[in-house]
Image (cartoon, grey):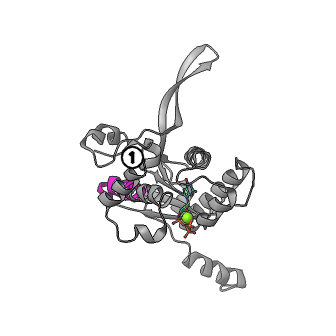
Amino acid sequence: MRKNSLGDRMKEYERTSDTKLVRRLPMIVRLDGKAFHSWTKKSGCVRPFDHTFIDMMAGLAQYLCENIGGAELAYGQSDEISILVRDDQNIDTDAWFDKRLQKVVSIVASLATYWFNANNAFEKKFPAFFDARAFILPEHEVKNYFIWRQEDATTNSLSMLAQSLYRHGELQHRKWAELQDMCWQKGHNWNNLETVEKRGFCVYRREVVVEGRQGPVTRLKFLIDRDIPIFTSPDSAEWWSRFLKA
Ligand SMILES: Nc1nc2c(ncn2[C@@H]2O[C@H](COP(=O)(O)OP(=O)(O)OP(=O)(O)O)[C@@H](O)[C@H]2O)c(=O)[nH]1
Ligand SMILES: [Mg+2]
């Protein structure tokens, strides 16, 4: 074959944009609903927290964990889901799609878009789309990443509650305690919201007993946890230990 044939030249163009993330380091994949401010409105989502929508997002997180090789933990809040993916379980563990960035993000976004639309539980079914990004980070930042997203969830949660009770102009430049107080004045104590409304949900493997051929057997399955701890709390250290390397 002639060197520098048309195919070689085109493959070279492709190859230079085919980024691979570093092996054996934790990878985070985050997806986010595209223009969900309008999608939730058109679909008739209840404000401030719509449990049909939250259940769809939690079901989506479970589906993604089951379909992303190496997924260990998913954390969801609002219209976003972050997934911790590992490829360092054993010395010969393969990385999902070789950690090729374009493959990973395009497949995750299409898996999400497929599942979410196929399982849309609203009466008015508007098409929904997701973007996805993936990156690696040092082991000691894994927990901090999830703390960052959970703090965002908590701030959003109080804003969502306040926005459902007051006009936009009344809420500008208000501090956390002021917003809480304003909600309380209208009979809504933010502290008494459900955990999933205040800080999101997780999906991770837990033991379940299933019926095998020779009686009940224990299996590990990805399940939704709607009662997750505050990630910065010292009490959550044991909960975290199942996802973090020593
Ligand atoms: N009514 C209702 N809306 C929600 C709920 N959860 C999330 N949303 C909406 O989803 C939006 C998600 O915010 P963003 O992801 O920042 O904004 P976006 O409109 O999706 O825009 P892009 O992500 O940049 O495409 C929120 O601003 C809310 O409007 C819910 O439980 N009920
Ligand atoms: Mg969005």
SS of the residue under disc 1: loop
Quarter of the image where ligand 2 sits = bottom right
Relative depth, front residue between 162 and 50: 162
In the picture, measured across the screen, residue 160 lies left or right of residue 191, that is right
Q: Which residue is mark 1?
A: 189
Which residue of the protein is positioned furthest toward the top in this rendering? 214
- Looking at the rendered structure, the kind of residue marked 1 is Asn
Q: Which residues are magenta?
A: 140-154
Q: Is residue 141 magenta?
A: yes
Along the line of sight, which residue is nearer the eye, 179 or 243?
Answer: 179
Vertical side of 4 occupied by 176: above or below: above
Residue 201 in the image: state x and y as whole percent: 47, 45
Residue 137 visible in the shown view: yes
**Side (left or right) of 18 relative to 171:** right
**Residue 148 in which image quadrant:** bottom left
Asked whether 36 or 219 is in front, the reply is 36
Residue 225 at x, y percent in the picture: 47, 38
Left or right: where 107 falls relative to 171:
right
Quarter of the figure with the C terminus: top left
- Quarter of the image where one finds residue 13: bottom right
Question: Magenta span: helix, strand or loop, mainly?
Answer: helix
x and y, in percent, of residue 96 in the image: 54, 54
Q: Residue at x 68, y 51 (%)?
A: 115
Relative vertical location of residue 101 with respect to residue 44 in this rendering, above or below: below
Residue drawn at (45%, 41%) of the image: 194
In terms of depth relative to the viewer, which is nearer, 37 or 79?
37
Quadrant assignment, res 193: top left
**109 magenta-colored:** no
Q: Residue at x 38, y 50 (%)?
A: 184
Decide if residue 92 is in sight here: no
Report if the beta carbon of the residue with label 1 is closer than 8 angstroms to ligand 1.
no
Looking at the rendered structure, the number of numbered marks drawn on it comes to 1
